[in-house]
Image (cartoon, helix red, strand yellow):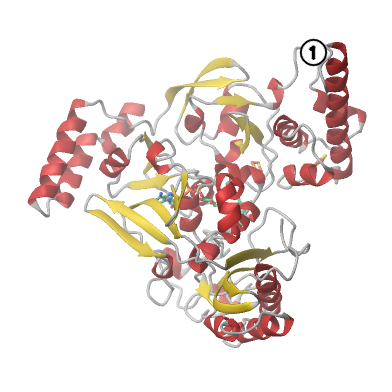
Amino acid sequence: MADEHKSTFSRRGFLKGAGVAAATTAVESANALAREAQAAAQPDPTLGPGALPVKLRINGQDHAVTIEPRYTLAETLRNNVGLTGTKVVCDRGSCSACTVWLDNVPALACMTLAIDATGREITTIEGLATGDTMHQVQAAFVKHDALQCGFCTPGMIMSCAALLERNPNPRLADVKHAVSGNLCRCGTYPKVFAATLEVAQQRQQTAGLVGLTTGKEA
Amino acid sequence: MNKFAYVDCKTVDETLAQLGPDATIKAGGIDLLDLMKDGIVAPPKLVNIRNVSSLRGITAAPDGLRIGPLSTLTEISVHPEVQLRYAALSDAAGHAATPQVRNMATLGGNIMQRPRCWYFRSTDFDCKKKGGTSQDCHAHEGENQYHAVINNGTCAMVHPSSTAVPLLAMNAEVELTSKRGKRTVPMSGFYVPPEKSLINETVVQPGEIITSIFVPAPEPGTRSAYQKYGEKESFDWPLADAGVVLVMAGQHCRQARVVLGVAAPTPMRATAAEAVLTGKTIDEATARAAAKAAMQEATPLSQNGYKTQLFQTAIYRTVLLAAGQMQRDPSAIG
Ligand SMILES: Cc1cc2nc3c(=O)[nH]c(=O)nc-3n(C[C@H](O)[C@H](O)[C@H](O)COP(=O)(O)OP(=O)(O)OC[C@H]3O[C@@H](n4cnc5c(N)ncnc54)[C@H](O)[C@@H]3O)c2cc1C
Ligand code: FES
Ligand code: FES
């Protein structure tokens, strides 16, 4: 199927058009010819529109999937890899339910093409826990009852955990800012703030204790 | 989303070679995917420029700021030199959309995004902007609470880019590259008003790519500010936003540039407001007079009269913020 579609976008056909358009001056056509020659020496870089094999690195593991270029990362995680923790609500970039980390930076899986995530470290909510031990932010969400229907929760936790990675000592305003794109229709925000600030505090204390036991200043 | 072929490019030359008639550039992909998911555009081939490393990076030189079009809104908002000398730009980038969107959205894509007008964004309406046959702009007789209050006679859409507002106020220039070479377009000539073209919002031609955005260094005594007002505290396009650049000698204003986003179909200089401020001592009264002058030419539609008041507030408070006479407005977004 991939090849069938590919034929309509052949590099040769495209370059013919490009060559004609650029042939307005001698210099330009020479440039176009040089480019054409260079391109002819290389394999056609066009992928799709049919399905093709793609490698994704998710939560520290390589996954091989076969997807069309139009598949979003959210669809691919849920439908092809079976990681359904990442939720899709608006599918338009406006609720952040689908937040994952790309190279440790919060990003929207619904507005990312899976093919664009190749070569990047993808971290999903499933990647936060260590075995059966919850990530501190997950545990704090449970303790503070920071969820009701739970649909926004994976995205919310990804935002809060990322905040603590880049700012170990956040103020309330920083937490509010970090989740300012995460829409919670159940109104769990106060508990989300409390949970996140508590983890920050716990970590400070632990850092303090470690500092004491090793004789370093905290 | 429609099926499409995909090419990943690593250099500008590779990109130009791929930009045939079927091709559409994809940077962060936020606006493009949005339009494709809604069926408003169906490009047969996407040319991914996200990995063209020469289009990244922010360089602050004595003559000004060179911003690679792939710089994300987050990168622009946290850059120390941008915060210090180009405050309105850092504020606009930092208060657009959501943290996640800002991590992904590029400056080039931001100024190239399409209007949010719901008649344009819905396949149920044959709006003229999409080449439809309807005689009038649907917003004129329809739901128009978010539409233009100035120059709205042909089409009442508003260009939604927040960063375009300070870029215009700072006399920025956009460098465009095609197979034919490079050209530079000032921000003042970058957007095309509906009476000139209903289809294209910018002068960027097929086969052209934004390769740099240059912001000239501010003159000594320059202060700038940007504020955005909307329905929500976060994740929404503005209902009114203002960018103000003042060249000051003490509290005396030698030069003023006031730009309004989402007031007219394209970001606009409020020259009437600038005239009120220039040569004056900036205080509450002059700021108020400037705000009023800017809205003299407004021709609100049936549901958006409130925007003229909101713009007056935005201009008044942003002028005072730029002049250092007011703190950032807690009711502004962000
Ligand atoms: C919930 C939400 C809220 C938002 N709020 C705001 C807001 O308040 N203010 C605001 O300004 N925006 C807002 N946005 C819009 C968002 O900022 C834009 O969609 C984004 O900046 C587009 O950038 P991109 O890199 O993703 O562009 P893409 O989607 O990749 O591209 C957009 C267009 O630009 C073209 N293009 C991209 N790069 C180049 C280039 N270098 N040369 C030539 N053409 C190019 C593409 O062909 C395409 O047509 C919001 C978006 C969402 C989802
Ligand atoms: S599902 Fe991705 S932002 Fe809403
Ligand atoms: S817990 Fe229901 S949406 Fe947040």
Image location (x, y in percent) of residue A83: 65, 23
Q: Nearer the viewer, residue B98 or B20?
A: B98
Residue under numbered circle 1: A132
Q: Nearer the viewer, residue B256 or B265?
A: B256
Q: Is residue A151 above or below residue B332?
A: above
Query: Quadrant of residue B263 in the image?
Result: bottom right
Identify the subunit bearing mark 1: A
Image location (x, y in percent) of residue A204: 84, 27
Q: Is residue A133 above or below residue B184?
A: above
Instruction: Give the residue at x 35% y 63%.
Output: B185
Image location (x, y in percent) of residue A89: 69, 42
- Quadrant showing the C terminus of chain B: bottom right
Where on the image, by quarter, is ligand 3? top right
User: On the picture, is A123 further left or further right than A192?
Assistant: left
User: On the picture, is B143 further left or further right than B129?
Assistant: right
Q: Is residue B205 above or below residue A60?
A: below
Image location (x, y in percent) of residue A159: 72, 36
Residue B207 visible in the picture: no
Q: Nearer the viewer, residue B89 or A109?
A: B89
Instruction: Give the residue at x 24% y 35%.
Output: A10
Residue lying farthest left?
Answer: A26
Residue B268 visible in the picture: yes
Amino acid type at image mark 1: Asp
Q: Please tell me how many numbered marks the rendered image carries.
A: 1
Query: Quadrant of residue A215 in the image?
Result: top right
User: On the picture, is A25 further left or further right than B10?
Assistant: left
Classed neighbour count for the residue bearing mark 1: other residues with Cα under 10 Å, few (<14), some (14–19), many (≥20): few
Instruction: Give the residue at x 30% y 32%.
Output: A6
Helix, strand or loop at mark 1:
loop
